[in-house]
Every structure is written in C-alpha cells, then in structure tokens.
Amino acid sequence: MTSPADPPAGGGPSGQKRLKLLAVTACPTGIAHTYMAAEKLQQAAEGLGIDMKVETQGSIGAENVLTDNDVRDADGVIIAADKDVDLARFAGKRVLSVGVSEGISNPERLIEQVQGAPVHGGSGGGGGGGDAAQASTGDGGRERSVAYKALMNGVSYMIPFVVVGGLLIAISLSLGGHTDPKGGLVIPDDSFWMHVNEIGVIGFKLMVPILSGYIAYAIGDRPALVPGMIGGWIANTGELYDSEAGAGFIGAIVTGFLAGYLVLWIKKVEVPKFARPIMPIIVIPIIATSALGLFFIYVIGKPISWVFEHLTDWLSGMTGTSAILLGAILGLMIAFDMGGPVNKTAFLFGAGLIATGNQTVMGMCAAAIPVMPLGQGLATLIRKRLYSEQERETGLAALFMGMFGISEGAIPFAAARPAQVIPANMLGGAVAGAVAGLASVEDAVPHGGPIVAVLGAIGGVPMFLVAVAIGTVVTALTTVTLVDISERRRRGEPLVGGAGGPGAGEPVLAGVGAGAAVAGGGVGSGAGSTAKSPAAPAPSAPTPSAPAPQAPADAAAPGGEVLSGYLTEQTVKVQLAADEKEAAIREMAGLLARTGKVGDVEELVRTALRREAQGTTGLGEEIAIPHAKTDAVTAPVVGFARSAEGIEWGSMDGTKAKLIFMISVPEAAAGDEHLRILALLSRKLMDVGFRERLVAAPDEAAILEVLREVQ
C-alpha cells in the first residue's frame, strides 16, 4: 500500500508499482454532478500518473461497474456521493467518503487523502458497510456477479411486503381467530379482524411479483420492471397454467431473471432514431411482458402442474410406511420453498387426510411449518455479527411470524442465501416432521405453528412443541455454520480458527439481504449497488487504458441537428439578455418554444424552477444545465445559450454560469433518452478544449458545429 510519504506512482524509479485507485460517484438528483465528479477525478488521476477507474451511479443506471478484480487490485477507493453507496465490497481497502461536490472541486486533494484513509471493513466500518462487508479474495478474486446483485435487489424490496403482510395476518389470527375442524384457524367474515387479515394477504400476494420485478429491474433497468412483476404474478397464480399451487418465490426468481435478460437482449436490437424514446416505456415492456407471460403459461407452467400432481399421488402411496420417514419427507417438502408448490403439495396432502380421520399427517406438517422462520430468526440472535442490522430486524419479525405458522417469514433469508439457508431449513423441517411422526402428534385443523397448540387443535402438545423446538435449533445452528463456512471461503480464511487482519475470524456477509442490498440506491434513481446495463448506448466513464472516444464532426446527425436531433440551430442563442437565474430560465424556455414543442411556457418555467429548488443545476466550471420533465412540452427539446458576464447559479465552485444548456422532456414519454443526453453533456463539458471552442464560436452555426462533438 502506498503511504502518503511515498513518491507519486509513476513518478519514481523505473519499475515502481503504479498506484491504482477506484472511485464511485453519485448524486441524489440531476445526474450531471455524478458524471462531472467522475471526469474531474479521472483527469486528476491521469495528471498525477495514477490508474483510476470510476463507477458512476446515475439515474441512467450504474456504469463502468467496478468488478471484484478491480477491488482486489486497488490501493484505495474514493466515494464522492451525496447518497448511500454500498461499501460492503470494499472491505479491507482504504476508503475515503466525501460529498459529490468534493469530487468536482478538489479531486487532487482526494487522491492524496485516500492514500492515508482508514481501512474499511473492521468493527464500525463507515459508509453503511460495517460488519456486513465483503472482501474479494481467492485466486483471481471471486466475481460478485450481476445475477447475485440482482437477487439481492429483489430480496431487499420484497422484505417490507413479507414483514407487513405476515405480521398483519399473525395479529388478525391471534386476536380474531378461532379453531375450526374443517377450516383451520377461522376469522368471522365481515369482522374487523377479517379486514386486517385481508390487508395482510394483499401484502403476501404482492411479495412474489415484487421479488421478480426488482430482480428484473436490477438487470434490465426500468423497462424490465413491468415484465418482471407481471411474470412474477403469473408464476404465483397456478390457475393460469392448471396448477393447484403456483410456483411461489422460486418461480418469481426464475421470471425475474428471464425478464431482466430478455429486456437486455431486446435493447441490443438496433431501431430507427425516431423510435428510441418510446422503446423503454412502450415497446420493450409490451414485448417482454407478452413473451415472458405466454412462455410461462404454455411452456413452463404445464410441466410444473404435472410434477406436483404426480408428487401428490406419490405421497398418497406412502401413508402405510414408517411414520418417521413420512414425517421427514413432509418436513423436507414443507421447508423447501416456504409456501411454494412443493410446500403446498405436502400441506394439501396433510390437510386432505384430516377429513378421513387421519390427523397425524397434518401433525407432521404442522410441526415443520414454523421451523423455517423460527430457525432463521434464532440464527440472527445467536450470531449477530453474521447479519446486517436490517436482517436482524427481519429476523425478529420472522420469529413472530413463526409463532403463528407463517413459513413465508423465512423467504427473505432463503432468497438471499439459497445455498446455505434452504438446506438448513430442510434439515430442520425434516427433523421436526420426523419427531412429530415418531410421537404420533395430531393436528385437527389445516394450519401449523405454536398458535395451533395454544388454541387447542393439537393432540400431544408437549411432543409437538419439542419437535418444533428441535427443528428450530437444528435450522439455526446449520444456517450459521454454513454461512460461516461460506464467508470464510469467500475471504480465503481457514475453515477452522482464523488469523490475521482486521476482523479475522469474524465472518461477515457479502452485503446479503435487505441492509446491504438497498444501501446503494432507490427506485426513482435506479442507482444502487446493483450492476445494470445502460438503457441506451451511452459510453461508460473512461479509464486510463480506454480514453473517452470523440466522434468526428462529420459523424454527427445531418441537417444541423445534434444530440439526437433535440438541439438545432433554432434552439441556440449566442448571447442571453438575462442577468439572473429565473430570467435566464424564462429566456431559455422562450428559446425552446421556437420549436413549437412547448405547449405551456409558464408551466415549463415553473417546473424548471422547482427543480432548481431541489438543488442547483449549476455544475461549476461556468456551466449550468437546468432541466425539466413536464407535459408542458410535447417532445424532448434541448437549448443552448451563452452569457458573456455570467449568471449567478449557486454553482459548487462559486463560478457564474456562462455556458447554459436547458433540457426538457414530456413526463409521459421521457424514457432514458434525456438522461443519456445529460450524461453525455456532463462528460463532454469537462473537456477544457471543448469549452474553449464553445466560448469562441462566433455565431449559431459555429456553436452548433462545436456541439456536434457531443456524441
């Protein structure tokens, strides 16, 4: 590691190791700051002879994403962001976190400071990473794949639906329910608690499409959200493909990935320029949703239905075999997908036998049903350091749901770490079912969990509770053991003991679950720690080995149009008359109105001013890019004007705005095109030579010729 006292990389003796730095830039609004900070850091690094790669987390999606190999080889990481950025992947590296304005104003100072920054990943690590950090280790590093990050994104958005739905159902059952031999736990129709229960059921119904939708979103960005959610709903609605039980959360994972990668494939298809704005909001979602839905109904759904019908027949033929073996098999099935088709097949089998007078099979199922949420909740208590704070909170909710026989409480844990959690769940469920079978536990109602025993529906309550307790402990201990082994392998630590380095011997998670998965972004911005492919062919931030290409002027659009035809000579003005911000925005709005694409100039001005109130669009370097998304315009339009004296715009570096662009797009047809233009402008405006040519151009035609370079 290069220390502050070391000579600059590249400037020392021949053969000296060249310093390698990483950076992440992000801002909560107006992505221009994101890209300007990236360009400034890149330029400063090149000037100092330092290798630097910058990941931008803009509204268009994460670009130039840092890989585990990048992280492994880095000497330090600069986070220049005004929003949460997931730091889990930078465990063991020197990390410097500052605001995005620092990346624009003081890039050289940040490069110097990061060389002495604290190492992230130990106790109390900053930036939201803390103990839920991951070091990239092993031969060649282990790639944290796009698929893994997408899965985490889906899990993070699903968790609130699981918690809210499950707790409302549990509360309604406990306060308003009673046992009924034919209907299980029953809540009187039209009662207050029935309405509470129905609200909770809605949460559970939404849980599966939310998981699918946000897996797809993380892969294919916003165009993938609708096909992902609708695909998840179809997967969970068995009657659409003649199945008594839908495909559950496992089906949602399948549809999420199918939707995401289908959208990525469609995005690669070349389309005429006029069709690009409607691709992400109309064409891609319709094609992807129709194709995925029909594929699931006609191709995947039928085999699912066939498999589970025959599985039920197979179980029916086992009733005369050993009760222990049958209990273990039913427990394995109940625990496998927690409310999915395998679970429902076993549950319906047990429930169907109650009417015949055989209540022992349902007793086996009832003992296994609460084991998964109880076991995962217990795991978060006995090994807290393995879990993020939000996962521990989810664990408490899972414990509560488990008491009421709501096995879906364990789904967030299973979706986040399927290789560790599902086997642990199945082992615990099998043990609980086997113990209940051995003790001939009976259940008179089709439900499970300790609540059924409390309400008097269980025959052999002591052994039922013993079966649940043993299964829960087995699940919890198996989970923490498997997660511990997985994380030690991930970090290259010995599986027994542990030595050396900060946090050695204390397993930490790879940003798993809710806390880490959502640390980097939200729905509106699309910026997060998840890796996404750009929705449009925008170039990623340049690296020293791959400098940003500059298209020749003759490659621009013909006929005096630049920026996809949104900026023309008609929307260029050599000199603004205004001398203050609001007047300048009004004058720019009038300039855009020349095109006939502005239906309401006053509304356009109001929208642009509201955007300014959220945060200045003055970017520094004498640049401002006000922008507005409003139906006051009928089509995307871009204008440019200069101010010789400059206009006070509240820029980060205190400079007055002399080069002013205004971008406006309709609310209903914005797509990603305006974000692509904003990103292109932000990057190009960091080129000093480009700005000088823009200032020196004598008239509108010359200005337009310079602007053709923005490609």
Image: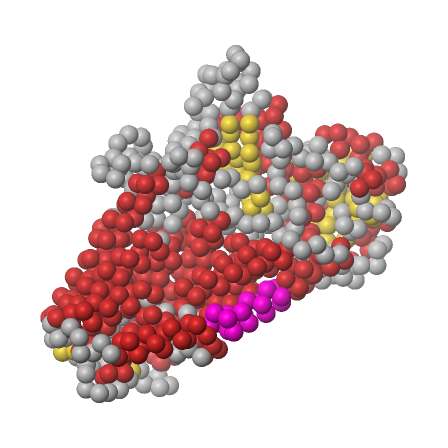
* Position in image of residue 322 (x %, y %): 15, 73
Q: What residue is drawn where x is 38% and y is 54%?
A: 416
Is any part of residue 263 visible from this angle?
yes
* Position in image of residue 115 (x %, y %): 46, 25
* Position in image of residue 679 (x %, y %): 66, 44
Quarter of the figure with the N terminus? top left
Q: Is residue 183 magenta?
A: no
Foreground: 26 or 89? 89
Left or right of 559: which side holds 656?
left
Q: Is residue 297 magenta?
A: yes
Foreground: 195 or 87? 87
Determine the residue located farthest toward the top in the rendered image. 13
Foreground: 436 or 413? 436
Q: Compared with residue 460, is residue 661 higher up or lower down, i.e. above or below? A: above
Q: What residue is drawn where x is 36% and y is 74%?
A: 308
Left or right of 378: which side holds 572?
right
Residues in magenta, as a range: 285-301
Q: Main secondary structure of the magenta part?
A: helix
Quarter of the figure with the C terminus? top right
Q: What residue is drawn where x is 17% and y is 75%?
A: 321
Q: Compared with residue 333, is residue 90 higher up or lower down, i.e. above or below? A: above
Left or right of 560: which side holds 511?
left
